[in-house]
Image: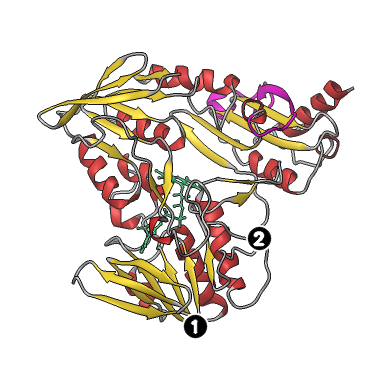
Amino acid sequence: MKVIVVGSSHGGYETVRGILAAHPETEIQWYEKGDFLSFLSCGMQLYLEGTVKDVNAVSYATPAGMRAQGVHVYTEQEITTVHPDRQTVHVINHATGEERDEGYDKLVLAVGAVPFDLPVPGHDLENVYAMRGRDWAIKLKAKTVDPNIKNVVVIGSGYIGIEAAEVFAKAGKHVTIVDMLPRLLSLYLDAEFTDTLTQTMADHGIQAATGQGVKAFEGKNGKVTKLITDQGEYPADLVISAAGIRANTGFLKDVVALDDHGLIKINDYLQTSDPNIYAVGDATLVPFAPTGQSNRIALATNARRQGRIAAKNIFGDQVTMPAVSGSSALSVFDYHFASTGIKAGTSEKLGVKSQSVLVTETAQPAFVPNDAGNAKVWFKLTFDPADGRILGAQIMSKKDVTANINTISLAIQANLTVYDLAYTDFFFQPGFDRPWNIMNIAAQKAIDSLK
Ligand code: FAD
């Protein structure tokens, strides 16, 4: 069997790893159009803040290591066309200019996405940056120590925008985050959480400019100097655009079925409209457990799950992609937060009726002092008012209690209710937590609210 895998980030890497584990005899050709194999943008903040010193370390695989396992690795080689009828791909080698065709038995597309380029005047000015991939990581790193960069404007307050803002605030820059939504991080957290986080960011020199749309970038001598929104103007020596992503699927238009957003349509087994071609990662939709619908949830965790499943199914297994709850976590200065599933703020848009309860408690019994690690915890549980089914949760604290959200993710995937969660057995030890875990307390409060 000859398998071609296109793309070397999370989806492609996991596909190759899965094939190697179960079918090491397979002829694997692995293509990456960039000059670096398997850069992981998830580690970019750690590199930009200096925790990880070497940009090349932000990777899971090296060409030499993969070749030693028998994989044919091709970097700087782009798949520009696929011919499903002949089962061939057309390859351009950007290093040499050479072109060739390669045949495949199965093809796995892990082509991912690129940052969305806002189509406004001035978007092509110098110092308008994005934050994805190794090339941008290196360019951004240089700007963190560039004394000419004083004012940084970040567009978009999802987790990528927040990471960018924190990096540059810690580097001593004045940062403004612009978002068309009314609150920072509003797709991840409800207002009880974002009010505190927005204040924390303000305390660290990050100004929120929410509820406004970007109209234009203005510049001088070809370099950006200002961002103009429908409500104001913001001085900018550097703009970091983190306003969404666009699937890397231009070359697949007449090859496999795409949706209106250019995402590759796949079935439960990750097969595209052509049964010999599979697709995984940010260029696809994933099943969302709380609604049963497919959603765009661009996370490495989903790409990895899909890659593992595709690696099985191309050999005839019939593994379906499990519905996910869209769990993510992030630190914002001293705070750690995580969320999963539906929030009160996203429920209406998803067409779901929901009810929520908020619990605020100290993580450990009140007698444990803060300087011994105790801290306030905010926990919000969202559930279906008709039957108490758990739909989502959010948590935040200066103590890292984010792992609770993984429990809620499991509860969502297992269709558990607040009645199940109210008396679930969770451990207690005052060095860690309280006799009633905060998830028990929230579920008990939810039951009271349903009476
Ligand atoms: P991508 O990562 O988009 O990679 C696709 C690869 O395919 C690219 O290297 C591209 O060059 C290559 N390629 C595309 N087309 C071709 C072609 N025709 N020929 C050859 N090669 C091609 N997710 C988390 O779960 N947790 C996190 O903490 C997290 N942090 C993030 C932080 C940042 C700053 C960013 C940008 C993303 C973060 N993500 C995180 C999201 C995560 O990085 C993505 O979900 C994940 O990278 C998607 O993987 P992918 O394989 O679909 O594609």
Position of residue 254 measured from the top left corner of the image (x, y, whole percent) = 45, 62
Position of residue 79 measured from the top left corner of the image (x, y, whole percent) = 35, 67
State if disc 1 and disc 2 touch (CB < 8 Å): no
Q: Residues within 10 Å of mark 2 (few under 14, many from 20)?
A: some
64 shown above or below 212: below
Q: Looking at the image, which residue sits at the far right?
A: 451
Element type at marker 1? loop
Ligand 1 is within 8 Å of the C-beta of the residue at disc 1? no
Q: Residue at x 41, y 30 (%)?
A: 156
Mark 2 or mark 1: name the one nearer the start of the chain.
1
For marks 2 and 1, give the one nearer the viewer: 2
Residue located beneath label 2 in the image: 268
Residue located beneath label 1 in the image: 26
Disc 2 from disc 1: Cα separation: 24 Å
Q: Which residue is nearer to you in this view: 385 or 432?
A: 385
Q: Which residue is nearer to you in this view: 45 or 366?
A: 45
Name the colour scheme.
secondary structure
Q: Residue at x 67, y 56 (%)?
A: 322
Task: Identify the amino acid type marked 1.
Answer: Thr
